[in-house]
Amino acid sequence: AMAQTLRQLLLPFTDAAGWFDWKDAPLTAATTPLLTGLIYAILSFAIGWYMREVRHGKGFAVRQLMAAHNLFLCFLSASMAMGTAAAMIRRSLEEESATWMFCEATSTQVAMQRADGVGEL
């Protein structure tokens, strides 16, 4: 009864497999994280140079900007943690134990079942 109730509560958060398709998702190319990291590094070095050479060490008051940036990262981390937790709980309910988190059986086949039950992905 508890597992069924939990399953019903989590269903809206775990049915993404029924409609999500990686090939249509934005920013899924391998170049995306590479370019993002490169742009971040360039901006970091450029800001460092600007602050040293142009502003001669006189900085900006960025305390509020840093707080907003950190808050954004906290929300992003929380959403990823919730998605991971929902997927882990769903899998644990399907397996009826949590041992798969520590040691996946070598015979396990990777298969994605659509959330609506119509075929595989």
Image (spheres, grey):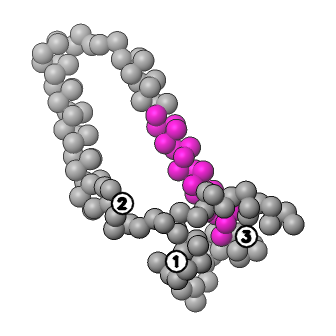
Which residue extends farthest right? 1
Label 2–label 3 contact, CB within 8 A: no
* Residue found at x 26% / y 40%: 40
Q: To which quarter of the image does residue 53 belong? A: top left
Which residue extends farthest bottom? 107
User: Does the segment drawn in magenta span residue 60?
Assistant: no
Earlier-in-chain disc, 1 versus 3: 3
Determine which of the numbered discs, if any, sits on residue 25 in the image.
Answer: 2
Question: What is the C-alpha distance between the residues marked 2 and 3?
Answer: 28 Å
Q: Secondary structure at mark 2?
A: loop
Which residue is labeled 3 in the image? 93
Note whether residue 111 is visible: no
* Residue found at x 21% / y 42%: 39
Instruction: Tell me the magenta residue range.
Output: 72-91
Q: Amino acid at mark 3?
A: Leu
Q: Amino acid at mark 1?
A: Met
Earlier-in-chain disc, 2 versus 1: 2
Which residue is labeled 1 in the image? 112
Estimate the x, y position of residue 1 in percent, counting from the top left: 87, 66
Q: Is residue 20 left or right of residue 39?
A: right
Q: Main secondary structure of the magenta part?
A: helix
At label 2, counting other C-alpha atoms closer than 10 Å, the crowd grade (few under 14, some 14-19, many 20 or more) is few
Estimate the x, y position of residue 18 in percent, counting from the top left: 52, 69
Q: Is residue 24 left or right of residue 84?
A: left
Q: Amino acid at mark 2?
A: Ala
At label 1, counting other C-alpha atoms closer than 10 Å, the crowd grade (few under 14, some 14-19, many 20 or more) is few
Q: Secondary structure at mark 1?
A: loop
At label 3, counting other C-alpha atoms closer than 10 Å, the crowd grade (few under 14, some 14-19, many 20 or more) is some
Question: What is the C-alpha distance between the residues marked 2 and 1?
Answer: 17 Å
From this view, report whether residue 117 is shown above or below residue 68.
below
